[in-house]
Image: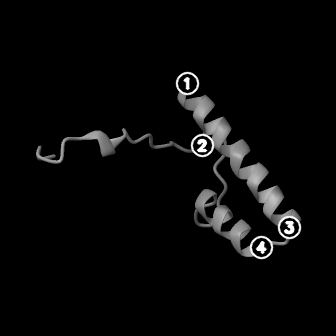
Amino acid sequence: MTKQTCIDELIETFKNRLEYLIHIDDYASADAIHSEFVVNGIEPKHGEYIWLFVPNLSRLNSNKSL
């Protein structure tokens, strides 16, 4: 899966969840999801923001130092 595919799926998932939460009048949860996606009142747009992809650190050996 490419990084762009991951971003596109994230956007679609957020959109679908927001629509559902608004439909059931759960505005507090919709606002929480919105605040995770929109930072400082600015919605990320294609090509204008750099997405950070962090490797899965949960599989690191806890005995090794970082």
Q: Does 16 appear above or below 35?
A: above
Circle 4 or circle 2, nearest the eye = 4
* Residue located at (78% from left, 50% from top): 16
Q: Dot 1, crowdedness within 10 Å: few (<14), some or many (≥20)?
A: few
The residue at which mark 3 appears reads as 24
Circle 3 or circle 4, nearest the eye = 3
Is label 1 in contact with label 3 (beta carbons under 8 Å)?
no
Q: Does 5 appear above or below 54?
A: above
Going from N to C along the chain, the mark reached first, 4 or 1, is: 1
Find residue 64 and report its horizontal and vertical position in percent. 11, 43
Find residue 33 and report its horizontal and vertical position in percent. 65, 62
Is residue 56 shown left or right of residue 31?
A: left
Residue positioned most to the bottom: 28
The residue at which mark 4 appears reads as 27
Tag of residue 18: none
Mark 1: amino acid:
Met
Q: CA distance from mark 3 to mark 4?
A: 8 Å
Mark 4: amino acid:
Tyr
